[in-house]
């Protein structure tokens, strides 16, 4: 196991012990152990474990050293498994409700017998939480609101998490001997930021073994529907998946249909009808004459053949429309006129600018982040740790920032990395739009990402002016996460996006497309118009650990949905190009 995976488990132990009301010193020891692991290099951990010297590290005692060693070597820990088993399984999800910590959960459990969301809801409705010491009517109201929020949000899933479930299923389907073709369709294929359910489409002539395999997957919790050529299941965690199996020569039509979106499908069907054709999940056939579309589609003589979606589009006089664009926002007209954009791809990215290290709230060292960027084949990596006002994120003061600038210069001088590391900062935009560092401090950096991290409940006018004031600062290179939204968790703050976009263009400031799967902010729906007006984008993973750099893939999905091409995105440029752009701005 990697150090971050181990640190996650130590933190989990801390939470579980807290839920049990254990000694605070013991809990603290696990939390400290997690922090210490994050601050040492992966290679150093391996060396210490091999040498049996882990307990010589400050903050790691003998007992903890043993547990870390066990996890590092086997990936398992008996102690943790027992601990998990000793706690009501429903208590964990109570921690997801905003404002609920282990201590509150324990009090609700001990005093009111709450064991899960359902019993907590009941206790609130019976006004028993309000009467409990340390809670009150206000906090009861807040808990109920949190539960309702969770129910509304709980129906959808982040693209990233859904994709991690989908990819092994797709690989499993493709490995079946009966399966000729398989794809994940629906909103996942369209790269939506959140996913209602997964939609798998398979081409096979022998259906039964495919259905059997699908409903028999290990993590299936419930089979909600099962037929000859289709099935629906629900996995642990709540995500559902639909499977459809079609004969090979219908695959392309079904793939197009089940990729959607619904609105795109409707527009495509109208286009077909205008040409005397009927388009459906079964095929493309003459609209006039005897029989239903399905019956006609089963007559191979009548059906327009298609091996790929490109053939299907071609049969309707269109260029291939990438799935991300199929939202009926003008893609069909563009495809007709040959005006479709050549969308930016993951392979176009040569680096990214908004990333954290363990100097602020990241979990990996500068060198580890640089190594991870090397492994992605990038040419540069921007480090933008938090600024001093973000004390909750361990923001850097002026001295710490200066030390980091020096450390980065040293690292670059060693030439040990393929990537050039840029010195940046994620500078807080203070409540009135001023920045968190003086101009002379900002001037020492290669670039500045300016973001809002507090006072998020300001009204729209105040927030808009606040952002514009920051944009007008000569030192701001790009605006971080425009609305601060956390998908399925926190609403965006109120801001007039079009005014902010205009100000950014006028001041030659970039707006980032924060690629964190929880953010995807600025939203893809705003990019096409903004980029047409001249706004430049940077796709930034906002990585807080080495693994987080891969999140740029989610940002690329959103960029593509926003019709962005390579030229719209700063981090498709090579190192010299980026340097030139930074220099021109100064
Ligand atoms: P989701 O699951 O809510 O994230 O969104 P989708 O787009 O994956 O929707 P889903 O799973 O209900 O259906 C998959 C695709 O199947 C959808 O994008 C288009 C197609 N489809 C489903 N129902 C209809 C329908 O009633 N009419 C049309 N034209 N297409 C439909
Ligand atoms: Ca779906
Ligand atoms: Ca579906
Ligand atoms: Zn931020």
Image (cartoon, rainbow, N blue to C red):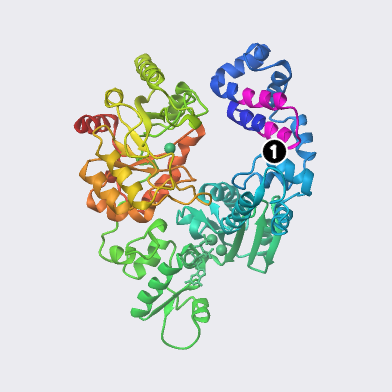
Q: Is residue 512 above or below residue 336?
A: above
- Give the residues drawn in magenta, as a range: 12-34
Residue 504 locus on image (x, y percent) = 26, 44
Left or right of 353? Residue 211 is right
Residue depicted at 30% across the width and 46% down the height: 465
Q: Is residue 537 visible?
A: no
Residue depicted at 38% across the width and 51% down the height: 459
Of 6 and 170, nearer the camera is 6
Magenta span main SS = helix
Residue 471 locus on image (x, y percent) = 28, 40
In which quadrant will I find the C terminus?
A: top left
Residue depicted at 44% across the width and 40% down the height: 454
| Disc 1: which residue | 103
Farthest residue toward the bottom? Answer: 290
Dividing the image into four equal quarters, which quarter contains ligand 2?
bottom right
Residue 65 locus on image (x, y percent) = 69, 19
Left or right of 379? Residue 20 is right
Residue 514 locus on image (x, y percent) = 41, 42
Q: Residue 308 lies in what quarter of the image?
A: bottom left
Residue depicted at 68% across the width and 66% down the height: 226
Magenta residue check for 79: no
Label 1 CB-ligand 4 distance < 8 A: no
- Element type at marker 1? helix
Q: Residue 12 lies in what quarter of the image?
A: top right
In which quadrant will I find the N terminus?
A: top right
């Amino acid at each position: 196991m990697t150090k971050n995976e181990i640190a996650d488990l130590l933190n989990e132990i801390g939470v579980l012990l807290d839920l049990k009301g254990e000694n605070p010193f013991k809990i603290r020891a696990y939390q400290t152990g997690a922090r210490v692991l994050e601050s040492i290099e992966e290679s150093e951990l391996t060396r210490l474990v091999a040498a049996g010297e882990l307990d010589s590290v400050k903050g790691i005692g003998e007992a903890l050293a043993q547990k870390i060693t066990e996890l590092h070597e086997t990936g398992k820990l008996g102690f943790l498994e027992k601990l998990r088993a000793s706690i009501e399984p429903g208590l964990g999800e109570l921690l997801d409700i905003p404002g609920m910590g282990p201590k509150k959960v324990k009090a609700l459990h001990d005093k009111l017998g709450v064991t899960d969301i359902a019993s907590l809801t009941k206790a609130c409705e019976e006004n028993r939480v309000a009467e409990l010491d340390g809670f009150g009517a206000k906090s009861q109201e807040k808990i109920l609101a949190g539960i309702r929020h969770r129910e509304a949000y709980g129906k959808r899933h982040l693209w990233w998490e859904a994709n991690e479930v989908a990819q092994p299923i797709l690989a499993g389907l493709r490995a079946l001997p009966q399966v000729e073709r398989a794809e994940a369709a629906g909103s996942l294929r369209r790269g939506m930021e959140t996913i209602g359910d997964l939609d798998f489409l398979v081409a096979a002539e022998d259906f039964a073994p495919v259905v059997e395999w699908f409903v028999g997957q290990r993590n299936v919790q419930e089979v909600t529907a099962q037929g000859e050529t289709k099935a629906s299941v629900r996995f642990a965690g709540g995500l559902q998946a639909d499977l459809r199996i079609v004969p090979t020569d219908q695959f392309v039509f079904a793939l197009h249909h089940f990729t959607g979106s619904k609105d795109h499908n409707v527009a495509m069907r109208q286009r077909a009808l205008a040409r005397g054709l009927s388009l459906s999940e079964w095929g493309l056939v003459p609209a006039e004459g005897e029989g239903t579309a399905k019956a006609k589609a089963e007559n191979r003589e009548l059906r327009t053949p298609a091996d790929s979606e490109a053939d299907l589009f071609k049969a309707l006089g269109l260029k291939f429309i990438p799935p991300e664009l199929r939202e009926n926002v003008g893609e069909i007209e563009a495809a007709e006129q040959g005006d479709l954009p050549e969308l930016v791809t993951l392979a176009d990215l040569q680096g990214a600018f908004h990333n954290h290290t363990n100097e602020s709230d990241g979990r990996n060292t500068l060198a580890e982040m640089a190594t991870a960027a090397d492994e992605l084949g990038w040419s540069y990596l921007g480090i933008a740790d938090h600024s001093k006002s973000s004390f909750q994120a361990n923001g850097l003061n002026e001295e710490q920032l200066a030390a980091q600038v020096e450390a980065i210069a040293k690292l670059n001088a060693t030439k040990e990395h393929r990537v050039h590391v840029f010195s940046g900062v994620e500078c807080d935009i203070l409540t009135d739009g001023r920045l968190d560092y003086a101009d002379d401090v900002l001037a020492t950096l290669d670039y500045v990402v300016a973001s809002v991290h507090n006072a998020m409940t300001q009204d729209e006018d105040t927030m808009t002016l606040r952002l514009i004031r920051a944009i007008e600062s000569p030192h701001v290179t790009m605006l971080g996460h425009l609305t601060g939204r956390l998908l399925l968790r926190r609403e965006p703050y109120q801001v007039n996006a079009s005014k902010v976009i205009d100000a950014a263009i006028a001041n030659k400031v970039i707006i980032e497309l924060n690629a964190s799967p929880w953010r995807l902010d600025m939203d893809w729906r705003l990019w096409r118009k903004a980029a047409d007006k001249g706004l430049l984008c940077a796709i930034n993973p906002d990585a807080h650990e080495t693994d987080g750099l891969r999140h740029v893939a989610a940002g690329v999905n959103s960029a593509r949905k926003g019709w962005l091409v390579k030229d719209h995105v700063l981090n498709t440029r090579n190192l010299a190009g980026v340097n030139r752009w930074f220099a021109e701005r100064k």
